[in-house]
Amino acid sequence: MTFRSFLAQLLIPMASLAQSTAGTARMGMPQPEAVRIGHLKVWMLKDGQVSLEGSLLKGLAPTDARRMLGGKDAAATPVNAFLVQMPGMNVLVDTGLGKDPLGGKDPGEDQGHLVEQLAAAGVRPSGIDLILITHYHFDHIGGLLNADGTRAFPRARLVVPLSEQTFWLRGPSSLPEPLRGRIPRLKAIFSAYEKARAFRTFADGEDPAPGIHALAAHGHTGGHTVYAFHSKGQDLWCIGDLIHFGAVQFERPEVGVTFDLEGERAVRVREELFREAARSKVVLAGAHLPQFVRIEAKGTGYGALPVPQR
């Protein structure tokens, strides 16, 4: 199965996402470096890279999209997970695409680097204590299982938003037609953790673990969730797919993407969370951003300021 056919099942109309990915040479990912947030150490783990076409943007003229993408029709886009080292606990937020998410992979596709990225950060899969999932698209949960269907993280508890679990598994008739074929794969992934008694859900407004706050950010999917960490007066948010095109949606947060489940709601949530992130000087860790950033108000949008890794 090619990356294009995989992603056709991943999001709503996502086949176009990877049109220019199949020819990308496999070149590996840069070594992760830690950012310190108070007592926390945080690593951006680059599991892979895809190409997002500017035509996926909604509410932006094609000429403006091309200009904001540096004269290109697509943006080379990372697929990230995040390791957050808290006192006494290693937390993994999302798990990337994995090596073999749906039983086949094009050799030209660059994905499945999560374990080697963890190793570069000094952590084995058995060293992960807690896994948090922002939402159920396969570029966020693809690394949960080994190729043989066993848990990739044998000691970890898997904790997910109840609203996301309910949206996907409440019954196929309530899902949009393009998404219904994903249910068996989702059940297989989560059952591996359920059988080990290492799976639980949390409700909106409930903290998934001590010291970690969940911010409901629904819109991209039915239960998309941001995870907030606080230490010594500093804040980190792992924002999942709150933003896809950093070159566009910081400056123009009202611009959506075609594969948001509820486009207007996703825009509203992004605008609300960006306002708070700018006010509170939060460090943002995006699944599809190339680096950690803080944002500040700039005109009607925001400017992104890189956070040094050290």
Image (cartoon, grey):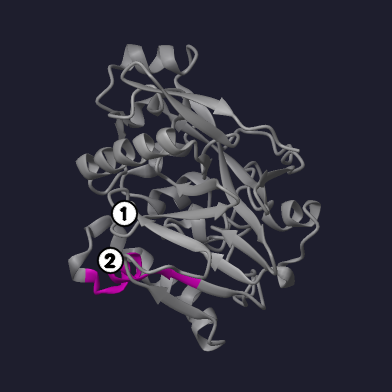
Report the front residue among 200 and 273: 273
- x%, y% of residue 200? 45, 78
Badge 2 crowding class, 10 Å Cα cut-off, few under 14, some 14 to 19, many 20 or more, is some
Question: Which label sits on residue 167?
Answer: 2
Quarter-of-image position of residue 131: bottom right
Q: Is residue 290 above or below residue 301?
A: below
Badge 1 crowding class, 10 Å Cα cut-off, few under 14, some 14 to 19, many 20 or more, is many
**With 203 as the anchor, is 156 left or right in this view?**
right
C-alpha gap between disc 1 and disc 2: 8 Å
Query: Which element carries disc 1, helix, strand or loop?
Result: loop
- x%, y% of residue 260? 30, 44
- x%, y% of residue 220? 32, 48
Say if mark 1 contacts mark 2, CB within 8 Å. Answer: yes
Residue located at (52% from left, 62% from top): 102
Residue where numbered disc 1 is placed: 221
Outermost residue toward the front in this view = 233
Which stretch is magenta?
A: 159-172
Quarter-of-image position of residue 255: top left
Quarter-of-image position of residue 215: bottom left
Q: Amino acid at mark 1?
A: Thr
Residue located at (49% from left, 79% from top): 199
Residue located at (56% from left, 47% from top): 233
Query: Which element carries disc 2, helix, strand or loop?
Result: helix
Q: Quadrant of the C terminus?
A: top right
Is residue 33 shown in magenta? Answer: no
Q: Amino acid at mark 2?
A: Phe
Q: Does residue 125 show up? A: yes
Q: Does residue 258 show up? A: no
Q: Is residue 252 above or below residue 172?
A: above
Residue located at (34% from left, 23% from top): 252
Considering the whole magenta stretch, tell me its main secondary structure: helix
